[in-house]
Amino acid sequence: MQKLELSVRIQSLENGIRELREYLQAIKPEGISVYDEVHIDGEKIKRSVFPPLFSLHVWNDGPDPVFIAINKKETKRYVKLNMDEDITFKYDVPVIKLLYYYCNAGEEANIRLVGLY
Protein backbone atom coordinates (compact mmCIF):
# COMPACT_ATOMS: atom_id res chain seq x y z
CA MET A 1 0.00 0.00 0.00
CA GLN A 2 2.84 2.43 0.80
CA LYS A 3 4.52 1.80 -2.57
CA LEU A 4 1.29 2.70 -4.39
CA GLU A 5 0.85 5.86 -2.31
CA LEU A 6 4.47 6.86 -2.93
CA SER A 7 4.06 6.18 -6.65
CA VAL A 8 0.96 8.41 -6.77
CA ARG A 9 2.79 11.22 -4.97
CA ILE A 10 5.79 10.96 -7.31
CA GLN A 11 3.48 11.06 -10.34
CA SER A 12 1.73 14.12 -8.87
CA LEU A 13 5.08 15.87 -8.37
CA GLU A 14 6.18 15.02 -11.91
CA ASN A 15 2.93 16.46 -13.28
CA GLY A 16 3.39 19.61 -11.21
CA ILE A 17 6.95 20.06 -12.46
CA ARG A 18 5.84 19.54 -16.08
CA GLU A 19 3.04 22.11 -15.69
CA LEU A 20 5.46 24.58 -14.09
CA ARG A 21 7.92 24.16 -16.99
CA GLU A 22 5.11 24.74 -19.51
CA TYR A 23 4.00 27.86 -17.64
CA LEU A 24 7.52 29.27 -17.42
CA GLN A 25 8.01 28.66 -21.15
CA ALA A 26 4.70 30.42 -21.89
CA ILE A 27 5.70 33.58 -20.00
CA LYS A 28 9.19 33.79 -21.47
CA PRO A 29 9.35 36.05 -24.54
CA GLU A 30 10.97 34.43 -27.55
CA GLY A 31 12.67 37.72 -28.35
CA ILE A 32 11.26 37.84 -31.87
CA SER A 33 10.09 41.28 -32.92
CA VAL A 34 7.78 42.19 -35.78
CA TYR A 35 7.48 45.52 -37.56
CA ASP A 36 4.71 46.90 -39.75
CA GLU A 37 3.59 50.22 -41.21
CA VAL A 38 -0.14 50.79 -41.71
CA HIS A 39 -2.13 53.51 -43.47
CA ILE A 40 -5.51 54.20 -41.85
CA ASP A 41 -8.22 56.13 -43.68
CA GLY A 42 -11.15 56.38 -41.28
CA GLU A 43 -12.39 52.80 -41.38
CA LYS A 44 -12.28 50.76 -38.16
CA ILE A 45 -9.89 47.84 -38.66
CA LYS A 46 -9.65 44.64 -36.62
CA ARG A 47 -6.36 42.78 -36.88
CA SER A 48 -5.66 39.35 -35.40
CA VAL A 49 -2.22 38.66 -33.93
CA PHE A 50 -0.87 35.11 -33.78
CA PRO A 51 0.98 34.01 -31.83
CA PRO A 52 -0.06 36.52 -29.16
CA LEU A 53 2.35 39.34 -28.33
CA PHE A 54 3.96 40.27 -25.01
CA SER A 55 4.24 43.91 -26.03
CA LEU A 56 3.27 46.31 -28.78
CA HIS A 57 4.65 49.80 -29.45
CA VAL A 58 2.64 52.12 -31.74
CA TRP A 59 3.78 55.43 -33.27
CA ASN A 60 1.40 57.81 -35.04
CA ASP A 61 3.19 59.54 -37.92
CA GLY A 62 -0.01 61.48 -38.71
CA PRO A 63 -1.21 63.67 -40.08
CA ASP A 64 -4.44 63.04 -38.10
CA PRO A 65 -5.19 61.38 -34.74
CA VAL A 66 -5.63 57.61 -34.60
CA PHE A 67 -7.53 55.56 -32.03
CA ILE A 68 -6.00 52.25 -30.85
CA ALA A 69 -7.40 49.41 -28.74
CA ILE A 70 -5.94 46.07 -27.67
CA ASN A 71 -8.14 42.93 -27.47
CA LYS A 72 -11.39 44.85 -26.84
CA LYS A 73 -13.17 47.12 -29.29
CA GLU A 74 -15.40 48.96 -26.80
CA THR A 75 -15.24 52.72 -27.41
CA LYS A 76 -14.11 53.46 -23.83
CA ARG A 77 -11.00 51.30 -24.30
CA TYR A 78 -9.58 53.20 -27.29
CA VAL A 79 -6.50 55.32 -26.74
CA LYS A 80 -6.19 58.47 -28.84
CA LEU A 81 -2.77 59.09 -30.37
CA ASN A 82 -2.13 62.48 -31.95
CA MET A 83 0.53 62.98 -34.59
CA ASP A 84 4.05 62.25 -33.27
CA GLU A 85 2.70 60.52 -30.16
CA ASP A 86 3.38 56.90 -29.27
CA ILE A 87 2.23 54.29 -26.78
CA THR A 88 3.47 50.94 -25.48
CA PHE A 89 1.25 48.08 -24.36
CA LYS A 90 3.34 45.65 -22.27
CA TYR A 91 2.33 42.50 -20.41
CA ASP A 92 4.05 39.73 -18.46
CA VAL A 93 2.33 37.05 -20.52
CA PRO A 94 1.51 37.00 -24.25
CA VAL A 95 -2.05 38.36 -24.25
CA ILE A 96 -2.18 40.75 -27.22
CA LYS A 97 -4.35 38.82 -29.68
CA LEU A 98 -6.40 41.56 -31.34
CA LEU A 99 -5.58 45.09 -32.43
CA TYR A 100 -8.23 47.64 -33.39
CA TYR A 101 -7.52 51.02 -34.94
CA TYR A 102 -9.29 53.79 -36.82
CA CYS A 103 -9.35 57.50 -37.67
CA ASN A 104 -12.35 59.80 -37.65
CA ALA A 105 -14.31 60.06 -40.91
CA GLY A 106 -12.43 62.12 -43.49
CA GLU A 107 -9.12 61.79 -41.62
CA GLU A 108 -6.14 59.53 -42.17
CA ALA A 109 -2.93 58.55 -40.44
CA ASN A 110 0.13 56.38 -40.86
CA ILE A 111 1.19 54.26 -37.90
CA ARG A 112 4.22 52.09 -37.17
CA LEU A 113 3.86 48.95 -35.08
CA VAL A 114 6.57 46.96 -33.30
CA GLY A 115 5.54 43.86 -31.40
CA LEU A 116 7.44 41.28 -29.36
CA TYR A 117 6.62 37.57 -29.36
Image (spheres, grey):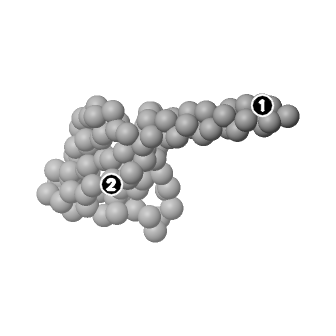
Q: Which of these two is toward me, 117 or 92?
A: 92
Tell me the amino acid under the disc marked 1. Lys
Q: Secondary structure at mark 1?
A: helix
Q: Is residue 96 visible?
A: no
**Position in image of residue 91 (x %, y %):** 38, 53
Q: Say what secondary structure mark 2 lies in.
A: strand
Q: Relative to 64, is 101 on the left or the right?
A: right
Q: Which mark is residue 89?
A: 2
Residue at mark 1 to residue at mark 2: CA–CA distance? 51 Å
**Viewer-side residue, 68 vs 32:** 32
Sort mark 1 into few (<14), some (14-19) or many (20+) by Cα contacts within 10 Å: few
> Where does residue 79 sit, x and y in percent of width and height?
34, 63
- Quarter of the picture holding the N terminus: top right
Compared to 63, does 8 lie above or below? above
In the shown orientation, is residue 28 left or right of residue 32?
A: right
Q: Which residue is mark 1?
A: 3
| Image coordinates for residue 75, horizontal then vertical, percent | 47, 64
Residue 38: quarter of image: top left
